[in-house]
Image: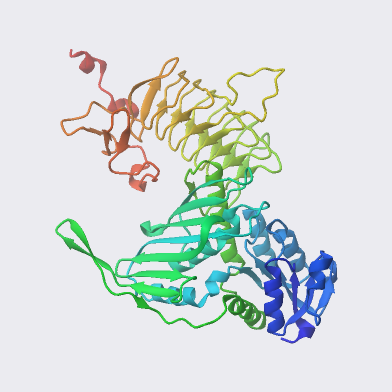
């Protein structure tokens, strides 16, 4: 490609200058667009210098643009370039919203344009080699993977560490495993700037049971960029700071009866071509411009990464609650003609918003939820997937509702303990957390600042004033525990001689150990029910003793 039909780099900042340098070395740089005069003056002498994007988009000699502006501008900049019939390379992330990413993918497809996302690790020769080994079955069945991207470096205030560091690692995991995860959870801390996470740990559950986690931080005493893949036959380590970038460990596990024993073997370094990842990435983009083939990290791949990032962010906002992934690009939600959904409300696909309900801007409602008549969801409220909210319920800011929760008609959730009409406490909302799978009965009240545990059952009319344990059945005012319930909502009887309580409908076993803490022995509290257990078998009355039997008559 000659310079007369070359590349324009949009943004000559901390990373943009690397793209400028690389495309210039490949002799395809035509223009640099940068509003800052000092940065613009640093552009190579042979490139056209443009302070405004419009100048670049009107230049018929610019065939494609590479967007290296702040992430918040990626969507608008990439959209403008696509609408100007330019091919587009956009640095990660593709956009900051899944719906925006989807619009870019559809626009590129409609215009017949190449859209590529800068997930540079996918072009690292060691990662390419590792991908080949995994695909060839060299490691056996992949069981687990984790990635650490840690540093003490340039700190950001415009985006958190999750969006700044993790897209690379998410892209690599999706590429190695050939699938997106089913669930994600994310926890972190904001130590320097309020609301901007400096450290996050994201955990993923992939189809087939493969698990992975990503640890990212810019508050780390030394630089570490390491990916570990654990297979049933061998293990592999990609360490970008080591002399040997890729090392295979043929360790295995030997079973003696039911006792596993580690069998260690000598590590083996895998030869890797000494190629610069950024140059390989830029060359790949240029090849796709010529062949019109879809890039390895095309818009669709960037959208998949964006969906995972979005799920991680929702989990981070919800104190680490697991979030289902993959529905963001599916069909939209339904809202009855009398319902109102404000601009800026985030509602997942398959959700139904019924008569006279109102979802305010800033509210987050997951996929496959049902919001009944007269339901109100305030901005700042977070509702997970498959949540059923019955008629006449208000979900206030400060409330976090995890997946599979049931809220009965006219139940009450609060967010201020001592409300006064003449005292404004809008910045002092207290958090109310309803954990996965719990039920709040009709006309019950949950006082703010409390947590209702996983699969707990709050009886109709109860008033919850303190935390409710997982699987607890609570009744009364104030609510007190009256027993334990199973995930199927059935009261668990007294434990047998073996200490087990068995759900009469599902057969799942439960144990109270230590006292006051119940756990299911057959299924993780955050795991979805297997399909065969997700459908009821008999009415509730079939599972409770008749009065005559209870009285002994």
Residue at 20% in and 32% down: 499
In what quadrant of the picture does the N terminus appear?
A: bottom right
**Residue 128 pos. (x, y %):** 48, 76
Q: Quadrant of residue 89?
A: bottom right
Q: Is residue 88 left or right of residue 417?
A: right
The spot of residue 354 in percent (x, y) is: 60, 35
The correct choice, above or below, for 437 with respect to 467 in the image is: below
Total of numbered circles in the picture? 0
Q: Is residue 475 left or right of residue 377?
A: left
Q: Which is more toward the observer, 213 or 329? A: 213
Quadrant of residue 95 within the rendered picture: bottom right
Q: Is residue 538 visible?
A: no
Image quarter hosting the C terminus: top left
Q: Which picture quadrant has residue 205?
A: bottom left
Q: Identify the residue at image location x=37%, y=59%.
A: 208
Q: What is the image's colouring? A: rainbow
Q: Position of residue 19 (x, y in %)?
A: 68, 74
Q: Position of residue 7 (x, y in %)?
A: 74, 77
Residue 518 at least partly seen: yes
Of all residues, the one furthest to the front in this rendering is 221
Q: Is residue 234 above or below residue 368?
A: below
| Foreground residue among 150 and 404 | 150
- In the displayed structure, 341 sits above or below 475; it is below
Q: Is residue 487 above or below residue 97?
A: above
């Amino acid at each position: 490609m000659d310079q007369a039909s070359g590349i324009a780099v949009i943004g000559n900042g901390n990373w943009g200058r690397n793209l400028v340098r690389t495309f210039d070395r490949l002799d395809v740089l035509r223009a640099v667009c940068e509003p800052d005069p000092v940065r613009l003056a640093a552009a190579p002498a042979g490139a056209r210098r443009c302070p405004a994007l419009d100048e670049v988009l009107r230049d018929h000699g610019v065939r494609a643009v590479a967007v290296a502006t702040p992430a918040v501008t990626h969507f608008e900049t990439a959209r403008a370039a696509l609408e100007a019939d330019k091919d587009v390379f956009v640095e990660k992330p593709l956009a900051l919203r899944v719906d925006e990413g989807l619009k870019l993918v559809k626009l590129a497809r409609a215009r017949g344009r190449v859209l590529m996302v800068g997930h540079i690790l996918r072009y690292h020769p060691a990662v390419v080699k590792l991908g080949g080994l995994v695909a060839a079955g060299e490691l056996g069945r992949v069981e687990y993977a984790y990635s650490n991207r840690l540093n003490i470096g340039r700190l950001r205030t415009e985006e958190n560490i999750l969006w700044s560091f993790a897209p690379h690692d998410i892209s690599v995991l999706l590429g190695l495993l050939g699938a997106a995860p089913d669930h994600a959870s994310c926890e972190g801390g904001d130590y320097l700037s309020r609301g901007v996470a400096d450290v996050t740990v994201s955990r993923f559950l992939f189809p087939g049971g493969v698990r992975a986690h990503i640890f990212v931080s810019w508050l780390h005493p030394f630089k570490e960029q390491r990916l570990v893949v654990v297979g049933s036959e061998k293990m592999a380590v990609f360490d970008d700071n080591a002399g040997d970038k890729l090392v295979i460990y043929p360790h295995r596990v030997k079973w003696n009866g039911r006792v596993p024993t580690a069998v260690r073997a000598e590590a083996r370094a895998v030869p890797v071509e000494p190629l610069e990842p950024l140059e390989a990435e830029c060359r790949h983009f240029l090849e796709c411009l010529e062949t019109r083939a879809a890039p390895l990290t095309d818009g669709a791949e960037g959208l998949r990464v964006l969906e995972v990032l979005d799920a991680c962010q929702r989990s981070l906002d919800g104190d680490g609650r697991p979030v289902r992934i993959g529905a963001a690009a599916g069909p939209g939600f339904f809202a009855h003609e009398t319902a109102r959904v404000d601009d800026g409300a985030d509602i997942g696909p398959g959700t139904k918003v019924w008569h006279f309900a109102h979802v305010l801007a800033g509210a987050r409602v997951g996929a496959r939820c049902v919001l009944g008549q007269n339901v109100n969801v305030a901005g700042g409220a977070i509702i997970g997937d498959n949540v059923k909210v019955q008629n006449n319920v208000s979900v206030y800011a400060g409330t976090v509702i995890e997946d599979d929760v049931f809220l009965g008609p006219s139940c009450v959730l609060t967010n201020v303990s001592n409300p006064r009409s003449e005292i404004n406490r809008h910045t002092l909302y207290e958090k109310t957390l309803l954990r996965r799978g719990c039920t709040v009965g009709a006309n019950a009240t949950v006082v703010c600042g409390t947590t209702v545990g996983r699969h707990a059952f709050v009886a109709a009319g109860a008033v919850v004033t303190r935390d409710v344990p997982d699987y607890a059945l609570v009744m009364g005012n104030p609510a007190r525990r009256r027993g334990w319930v199973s995930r199927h909502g059935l009261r668990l009887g007294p434990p047998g001689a073996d200490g087990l309580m068995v759900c009469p409908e599902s057969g799942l076993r439960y144990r109270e150990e230590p006292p006051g803490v119940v756990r299911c022995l057959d299924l993780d509290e955050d795991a979805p029910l297997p399909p065969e257990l997700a459908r009821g078998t008999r009415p509730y009355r079939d599972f409770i003793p008749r009065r005559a039997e209870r009285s002994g008559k």
